[in-house]
Amino acid sequence: MGNMDVAAAAAGLRIRFVTGHARFDRPTPIRRLATATLRGLCGTALLNSDPATLERLFKPGAHGSQPPAFLFQPLHRSFHFCDQFTFRLVTWDPLDELRPAFQKAIENYAPAPFGTSGAYLLGIEWPLPQSFAFESAGFGSPCLDIQFVTPLRLAHGKHWFGPDTLSLSPLANCLVQRVNQLSEFYGNGRQLDPYPFCQHAGICREIKRDLRVACPRRQSSTQDTYINLAGITGHWMLAGVERPLVDLLALGAVIHAGKNTSDGCGLIQTQPPR
């Protein structure tokens, strides 16, 4: 059987996270994926401040061959108006260069318009980073509630999986490929074998599916267009999920899955059913 040790692959990544606080000059609409707007603003600021770091860690590789070294993770769960919002920046560049580069770039760039809201970002408070150490669940789950907190956009050939067509095997394969890419470019190079994960996923039993499509988008100032962030959200309850799959899905809560992860898409959370 191929390598299914998720914890060993994750151990090669120096994952850090910072809970940041973005401040505005007035109450502004904080949409569900406000992290996408923040990610775009930080990219523009970094382009002005440190284009070399942007090319190495923010938008590395040709045609998406290398994943970015970060993602912005939303911590709020609903639309609201506020003069600040809290988010999480997750990074895995080995030397921890990107986080301080973001901080310096925003200091030089703010105040700056926050999307099309009319509000201006005044600055971001960046506490000291915390290190993340992945721990294996150590056991399978007789029943597991998988929540797609932010839109999961998962390719199926030239099409996208929908709420009725998504299955666990392609999701497991997507997460394995994600782990392997991060390990190759930022970790110890250890690779997981997708086949046994997909094989195990194929025998899990679906108990309940409450999935739908969410259709957020963000404006790209560099491309002068809107970027589609649509994907699957909701709850999915499965039975008979074995330990390696439980670990893989749990890691998805940190590294996300699918397309547009750096914007905050593809956040997966798992828990026993209520």
Image (spheres, helix red, strand yellow):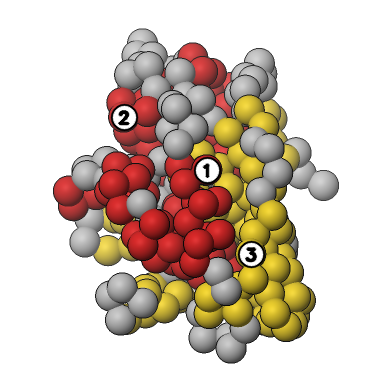
Residue sitting farthest toward the right: 274
Would you call the spot at circle 3 few (<14 residues within 10 Å), some (14-19), or many (20 or more)?
many
Observer able to see residue 112: yes
Dot 3 amino acid type: Gly
* Image depth: mark 1 or mark 2 in front: 1
Residue sitting farthest toward the bottom: 118
Q: Which residue is mark 3?
A: 123
- Placement of 86 over or under 136, stated as above or below: below
Dot 1 amino acid type: Pro
Q: Which residue is mark 1?
A: 100
Query: Does residue 24 appear left or right of residue 102 in this picture?
Result: right
Q: Position of residue 223 (x, y in %)?
A: 28, 75
Would you call the spot at circle 2 few (<14 residues within 10 Å), some (14-19), or many (20 or more)?
some
Q: Which residue is nearer to you in this view: 260 or 68?
A: 68
Dot 2 amino acid type: Phe
Circle 2/circle 3 CB separation < 8 Å: no
Q: Which residue is mark 2?
A: 185
Query: Does residue 129 appear left or right of residue 154 in this picture?
Result: right
